Structure formats: C-alpha cells, structure tokens
C-alpha cells in the first residue's frame, strides 16, 4: 500500500502480444499498450483494434487492468479516425486512455464520459498547480515528468486526490517529455507523434564557439545519452510519498525484458508490502535487471542526480553485465581465455570491449575449464571459449561483458508461454444426491458477489457397479489448469451410493467457469457508443465558427536584454516577450524594458518558460504580481502558470511548448481564457489554415529565430572541461556526425537548452502565413545581437505593412534581408511546407 492506504500498482509495458503475455503472467497489476495509430511508440508492433476485446477479456479475468496509450498530438485531418478508434477502445472495456493532446482530452470527456483519462508524461506535469488543473479538468491519474525528486513527488501527492503515477524503471528521455522537437526538426520524425528515432543516442562533439571553434574533450561521444532508470531500491520512499502506480518503461523492448523486469519488481513490491522495515533488494535481482537490458543504471532525478552520474557517454545501447577480463587469445586456434567473476554457460553471448577497435561479440558454443568441456563455468574460474574469427584486436586485460544470459532468457520465455503462476482463488461447493439435479457453485475468495451457479438438466442416479466419492468430485472440479482460477476451499456433499458420469461433471465444471467469467466481466460495465454517431457528432462539432474575425496583424518579438528591446521597439515591434531570470549572460530589467516599450506604445508580456517546478512557479507568480503595473499580458508555456494566472487579471497568451495542434485544443484554450494562442511548431501551413478558419481567436506562429528543440535538467557543458566556470562567458554547440551544429545554452538554473542547427526564416512566405489566418507574427530574437534584432524586426514589419496595403510583392524586402544576414546564413522553413510524420 502507499501512504494513503491504496494498493501500489505495478504498471507494465506491452509493445506486442508476446510482451502482453509476459506482463500478464509475470505479476503486473496493469498493462499499458498502444494501437496501430496515435501511440507514442508507433514503431512498436502494437495492437489492432480487433485484438482489444480479447486482450481486455484475458486481462480482466486475471484482475489486471488495461490502459491504451493514445498519447500523441493529433491533427484535424486525423480526428475522425481518432474518434472512431476511441469509440472502439471504449466499447472494448479498456480501463483508461493515456492522453497527451488537450483536444483529445476534451473529446474523451464529452463523448466517452465513462472512460477514465490518464494524463501522459508527455503533458510535462512537474508542479502542483498543473496537477490541480488536470484534476479539475477530469483526469483520474497523472503520470509525472521524470525530472522530479522524491520530495517534490511527495509534495504533489499531498496536494491532490487524483492518482499519481511515476516511472520506476527503464529508459530516460534526455529532454523533458513532450518538449523535444529535435528529431522532428532534423529528420521530420516527431517524438510528439510517436516517431522518435532516439537522436539523443547518437554521437556528438562539444564545441566552444570563438574566432576559432574549440573542440572540448568529453568522456565519450554520446554526450546526450542517459543511463537507464532503476528505482527498485526506492520503492519504500516512493510508496511513502503517496504515488499510486509505479510504471516500467519498455514498449519497444523485448517480451523477455518485460517478463524479467516485471517479475523482479513484482517480488520486490510484495516483499516491501509484507515487511516494509526489512525491505532489501538482492544483488541477484539487480544483476537480472542489468542483464536483460541496461545502459548502466541510475536513480536519476529521484535523487536529484543531474551530473555525469546520469549519463552513459560511452554506450548508448545495452551494455550487459561485467563478466571478467581477457587472459589470452590464441590467434591460431581462436581460443579466448577469460578470468570470470560470474558463472558463464553455453548459449550465453559475450562482448569484449577492445581497447582499440570497438567491440567483439561472440556466442558461447563451446566452453572449457581446465581443458575439460563443460556446460557452465563457475564464478572465479579461468574459462576458455572458441571465438568465431581467429584474428581480432583483442588484448590481454580487455573487459568482457555478458550481453545475453541464455538461462535468464529461457526462464522469461517460459513465463511468456507457460501461463501465469498467479491464479485467482475460488471456493467451490457441490451437491450430488440421488434423484436430484447436480448443483455446483463457485465464488472468488473474499468476493461473494463474484459468483456463479450451475444446475444439471439431469438427475443423479443410484450407482450399480460404481459409486461416486467426494474425492472423485473434487478431482473433476479441480481440473482448472487452462483457466485463471485455482480452488482454495471446498464444500462437497455426496449422497451415499450416488453415481454421475465423470464426463457430465466435466461439462458442468466448464459451464460453471464460463458463467463465472461472464459474471466477473459484467461487474465492469461500460456503456457502448455507436461509432457512426460519434463520427457524426465530431463532424458537427468541427463546423467552423460563424464569425472568425480578421484581426490586424502584429509583430511580437522575444528579447532577453534591454538593448534588444530598444532595437525591437525602434524598428516596429508591437509586442515584447520577456523571460525573467533565464539567460546567464543577459538579464533584462522588466522596469527598463517597460519604460522603453511605453515610449512607443509597445506592449509587454512576461514569459513563463516551459519548465517551472513549484518553487520556481511560486517565484514567477510573485514576480508577475509585483510587476503587474508594467505588464500587458502573461505568455504561458506551462499550464500550472495558467491556473495561477487567473487571479492576476492579466490577459493570458499560450506558448508553443503546450503543443496546440488541432481545432479542438485551440477552442479549449480559447474558452479557458487564452487571448492569443501560439500554434505548435510542428504544424504545416495547410493545417494552420484549417485551425484559423474554424476558431475565432488570435493565432500566433513563430516565423523567425532559433527554435528550442530540447530542454533538459542535465548541463551538457558539464561533460567537458572547466564546466560551470565557462557557461557565463562562452557559447557552445553540439555537432553531429554530419557537421550540423546545434547551439547549447545553460540557463540560471543550469538547465540546458538546445536549439535547432538552422534558423527559422520565413520572410519570403509572410503573405502565405498571413493569408492562412495568423495574426501575430512571432520573431524569436532573444539570442541575437541588438543590431540584428532591429534589422530583422524592420524587415518583417515592412513586409507585413506592404501586404496589409495589398502590395503582395515583397521581393525588395527579401533582397534587403539577403544583405543583412551573413554569408554563412543557413535557414529552414521548419514544418510549414513539410508536414511532420
């Protein structure tokens, strides 16, 4: 139980049918899975809608819940398919849907009120204010961001009555989930759309910018690759914090991984519940977790670990477990000698980390100890194996890892195919009397309402040669091997001299179990909805609003210094967006910015930023209250701020990290009080046009600047020399293997912000953007020199004014832009003309 007395749920992943059985048979309390579309793991095998009925039935009969991950952002053109899918998910009796998209959240609440909503970690929930907002909106559970310490989780749990879920084991995203645009901008594969190619696992160099860029040495090439989370030792602390569910990551992992990790955590949780004070985790359990998949383990943000201890610089994939070291290699016989500190068996696979030349992997086909062929070599022995090729760059002393433990994998496969060892206990009774119908009843232990009864359509007769004994009845009724039940109590009454053919008893048992199954499944009723009717309702709801006002376009400019503000105002900005206390190298004074803006009647919005833990949110709101007289609006990038801002009385604008991607979410934000909505940076121009034509609200689109593609708690620069002393005075980049350079900036909280390698530049396309219905032209210029801020603002201002006066030819402005930007200027149009996958 957790601190509130509720059961501590173990939630397991299933990316395939085999992984589903692995979780089901290994002790999961609930399983989350995705369908073919709209899942954040679209590249997994996943499940068809046709499979859901059987999956839910099998799980529910074992008292296991099913949650469907519907956790991507969804475009208008996909909403019809989405609502049909949700109708079938609802009708299958799924226990909840996991949601990222705010429009889908609204749709589920209105169309499927009995279907519970779990807020996905993709919603970026990391403060109590957003938890309260989600609770008020109708979420029944919230999966927190991984970047929270246990004390923060405890504070959140204490502030709400909604269930709180946290990841306990598996891969860690480098960026805050739901805030990563890296692969989207670079490779057109969006993590917010379930297509993440794991760009953070690739190789990068760290560069310091200057007259001559300097390569900073790092411990390894994989400077964005995190270790895997392993919170098994923290089960007591997490339970006491009040969390309701512990979630295992891994829908892209193997069924064997699922079986092993679920089994280990099941046993650990059960031991904790049985004896909280005596809870311990064995080294054997940790080894099993390491061997089934590990990039190295960390307790990560639970323990506020944000430095190099979080990272797996050398190996972005499974590293296995250290087995020992090489003692010799005979290149003529291909015999490899090993000093091993763990047992090694035939069928295992090893990997030698060669000092020079990478890795050498080999399956153990033959194994020798003291010149004798053996099946297993014990820990501490000197073993010899035969490698596939004679000549390798293997050296004495090289480390050897086991990356496949054959016995561990076979045990996992047995769990997948062999059925669950955890059965539902039932109590059986039978009455067999001469001249009377046979009556058999069953109920689940401790749940008398989960019961069934069968009465035969024949009467028991007097036996001639053979009579029925109590043991005979028990033997037939106890044949429950292919069911989810096990009999734990009996009440059998058999009349003297009575006889019933054993085949008839078997038929009655099968009928009884079918009835008991049906009763238990009916105990979880769900009102079914018509797929056609919800599709028709959606079509009616998506009809464009009658009066979509055409607004005068404005130029909105992000700035971080007073000098930038002055140049933006001087050159035609209508709005300034200021983020206080963000940059380590440039900190704008809101008083001075406000004074400069007021001189030209330019308005000022205070920007929250997308990451605000509760203490930061409290400080931000206090800053906003104390400077309210100098502000014209709040630019909100985290809905925790949105909830707190209501009492301030200032107009609220929503920012792009909130991932507004469709008409439904746009209307939701508008109806919730947003006066201006910045659209998702992943929308194409045609999609923007659809939203603008359907919703009467001021829409904003980012058309120029360095777009942030990752936000992370880890300081990227800490991988290099000098670390903290360098951030205040130097600019940094990470460079990929194709020589694309991504700027990196550390804020005052030591978080890293990584920007796209190309500047967003849409000056030649301003007319198309305005024609699409965008009325706030956003220039993100907070990383530019003041003179360039003024020049860029002037260009867009001139272009907008020309178009407003029906002069569509802005080629003169574009030519002037070509003179303003340096020769090496490289730009992108983002997703405006390249719809994201």
Image (cartoon, grey):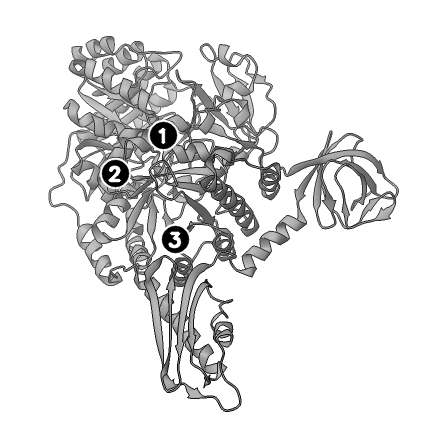
Q: Nearer the viewer, residue 233 or 471?
A: 471
Query: In the orientation shown, which residue stands out farthest toward the bottom?
Result: 464
Of the numbered discs 2 and 3, the one sitting upstream in the chain is: 3
Can the viewer see residue 190?
Answer: no
Q: Is residue 103 left or right of residue 444?
A: left
Tag 2–tag 3 contact (CB < 8 Å): no
Query: Label 2, on which residue?
Result: 135
* Residue plotted at (23% across, 29% down): 642
The numbered mark at residue 66 is 3
Answer few, some or many: residues within 10 Å of disc 1's Cα (few below 14, many 20 plus, some between 14 and 19).
many
The numbered mark at residue 154 is 1
Q: Disc 2 versus disc 1: distance between alpha carbons?
A: 17 Å
Answer few, some or many: residues within 10 Å of disc 2's Cα (few below 14, many 20 plus, some between 14 and 19).
some
Q: Is residue 162 left or right of residue 229?
A: left
In the rendered image, residue 271, in percent from the top left (x then y), is placed at: 50, 42
Q: Check disc 3 and report its element: helix, strand or loop.
A: strand
Q: Check disc 1 and report its element: helix, strand or loop.
A: helix
- Viewport quadrant of the N terminus: top left
Query: In the orientation shown, which residue stands out farthest toward the front?
Result: 496
Tag 3–tag 1 contact (CB < 8 Å): no
Can the viewer see residue 581?
Answer: yes
Of the numbered discs 2 and 1, the one sitting upstream in the chain is: 2
In the rendered image, residue 339, in percent from the top left (x then y), is placed at: 78, 35
Q: Nearer the viewer, residue 482 or 36?
A: 482
Seen in the picture, residue 196 relative to 435 is either above or below; the reply is above
Q: Check disc 2 and report its element: helix, strand or loop.
A: helix
Seen in the picture, residue 584 relative to 448 is either above or below; the reply is above
* Residue plotted at (29% across, 34% down): 131
Q: Disc 3 versus disc 1: distance between alpha carbons?
A: 26 Å
């Amino acid at each position: 139980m957790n601190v509130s007395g509720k059961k501590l749920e173990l939630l397991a992943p299933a990316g395939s049918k085999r992984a589903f059985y692995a979780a089901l048979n290994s002790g999961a309390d609930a399983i989350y899975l995705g369908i073919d579309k709209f899942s954040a793991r679209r590249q997994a095998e996943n499940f068809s809608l046709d499979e859901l009925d059987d999956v839910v039935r099998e799980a529910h009969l074992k008292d296991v819940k099913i949650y469907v991950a519907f956790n991507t952002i969804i475009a208008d053109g996909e909403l019809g398919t989405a609502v049909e899918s949700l109708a079938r998910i609802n009708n299958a009796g799924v226990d909840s849907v996991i949601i990222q998209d705010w429009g889908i959240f609204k749709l589920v609440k209105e169309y499927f009120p009995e279907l519970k909503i779990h807020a996905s970690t993709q919603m970026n929930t990391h403060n109590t204010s957003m938890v309260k907002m989600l609770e008020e909106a109708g979420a029944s559970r919230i999966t927190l961001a991984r970047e929270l310490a246990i004390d923060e989780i405890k504070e959140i749990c204490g502030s709400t009555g909604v269930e709180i879920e946290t990841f306990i084991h598996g891969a860690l995203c480098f960026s805050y989930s739901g805030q990563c645009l890296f692969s989207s901008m670079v490779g057109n594969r969006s993590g917010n759309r379930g297509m993440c190619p794991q760009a953070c696992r690739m190789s990068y160099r760290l560069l310091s910018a200057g007259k001559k860029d300097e390569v900073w040495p790092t411990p390894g090439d994989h400077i964005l690759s995190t270790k895997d989370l392993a919170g098994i030792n923290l089960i007591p602390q997490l339970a006491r914090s009040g969390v309701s569910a512990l979630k295992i990551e891994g829908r892209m992992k193997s069924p064997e991984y699922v079986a092993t990790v679920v089994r280990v955590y099941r046993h650990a949780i059960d031991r904790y519940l049985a004896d909280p004070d005596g809870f311990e985790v064995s080294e054997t359990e940790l080894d099993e977790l390491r061997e089934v998949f590990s990039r190295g383990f960390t307790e990560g943000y639970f323990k506020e670990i944000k430095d190099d201890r979080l990272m797996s610089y050398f190996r972005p994939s499974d590293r296995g477990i250290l087995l020992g070291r090489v003692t010799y290699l005979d290149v003529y016989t291909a015999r490899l000698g090993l000093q091993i500190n763990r047992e090694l068996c035939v069928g295992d696979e090893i990997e030698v980390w060669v000092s020079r030349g990478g890795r050498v992997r080999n399956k153990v086909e033959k194994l020798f100890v003291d010149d004798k062929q053996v099946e297993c070599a014990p820990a501490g022995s000197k073993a010899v194996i035969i490698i596939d090729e004679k000549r390798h760059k293997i050296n004495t002393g090289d480390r050897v890892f086991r990356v496949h433990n054959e016995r561990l994998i076979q045990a996992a496969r047995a769990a997948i195919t062999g059925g669950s060892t955890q059965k539902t206990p039932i109590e059986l009774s039978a009455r067999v009397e001469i001249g009377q119908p046979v009556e058999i009843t069953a109920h689940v232990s401790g749940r008398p309402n989960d019961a069934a009864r069968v009465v035969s359509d024949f009467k028991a007769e007097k036996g001639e040669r053979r009579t029925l004994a109590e043991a005979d009845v028990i033997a037939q009724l106890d044949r429950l091997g292919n069911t989810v039940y096990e009999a734990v109590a009996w009440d059998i009454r058999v009349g003297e001299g009575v006889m019933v053919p054993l085949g008839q008893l078997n038929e009655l048992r099968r009928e009884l179990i079918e009835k008991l199954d049906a009763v238990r499944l009916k105990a979880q009723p769900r009102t079914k909805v018509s797929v056609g009717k919800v599709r028709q309702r959606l079509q009616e709801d998506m009809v464009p609003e009658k009066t979509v006002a055409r607004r005068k376009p404005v130029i909105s400019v992000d700035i971080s210094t007073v000098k930038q503000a002055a140049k933006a105002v001087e050159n035609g900005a209508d709005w300034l967006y200021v983020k206080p206390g963000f940059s380590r190298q440039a900190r704008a004074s809101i008083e001075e910015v406000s004074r400069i803006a007021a001189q030209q009647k330019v308005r000022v919005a205070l920007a929250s930023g997308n990451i605000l833990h509760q203490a930061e949110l409290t400080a931000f709101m206090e800053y906003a209250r104390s400077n309210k007289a100098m502000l014209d609006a709040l630019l909100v990038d985290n809905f925790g701020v949105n909830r707190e801002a209501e009492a301030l009385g200032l107009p609220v604008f929503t920012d792009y990290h909130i991932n507004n991607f469709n008409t439904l979410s746009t209307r939701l934000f508008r109806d919730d009080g947003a006066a201006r909505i910045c659209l998702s940076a992943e929308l194409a121009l045609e999609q923007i046009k659809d939203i603008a034509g359907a919703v009467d609200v001021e829409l904003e689109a980012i058309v120029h600047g360095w777009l942030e593609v990752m936000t992370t708690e880890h300081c990227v620069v800490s991988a290099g020399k000098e670390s903290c002393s360098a951030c205040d005075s130097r600019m940094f980049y990470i460079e990929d293997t194709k020589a694309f350079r991504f700027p990196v900036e550390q804020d005052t909280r030591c978080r890293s912000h990584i920007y796209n390698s190309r500047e967003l530049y849409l000056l030649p396309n301003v007319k198309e953007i305005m024609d699409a219905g965008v009325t706030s032209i956003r220039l993100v210029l907070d990383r530019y020199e003041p003179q360039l801020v003024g020049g860029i603002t002037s260009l867009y201002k001139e272009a907008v004014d020309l178009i407003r006066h029906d002069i569509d030819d802005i080629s003169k402005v574009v030519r002037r832009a070509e003179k303003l930007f340096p020769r090496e200027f490289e730009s992108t149009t983002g997703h405006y003309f390249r719809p994201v996958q």
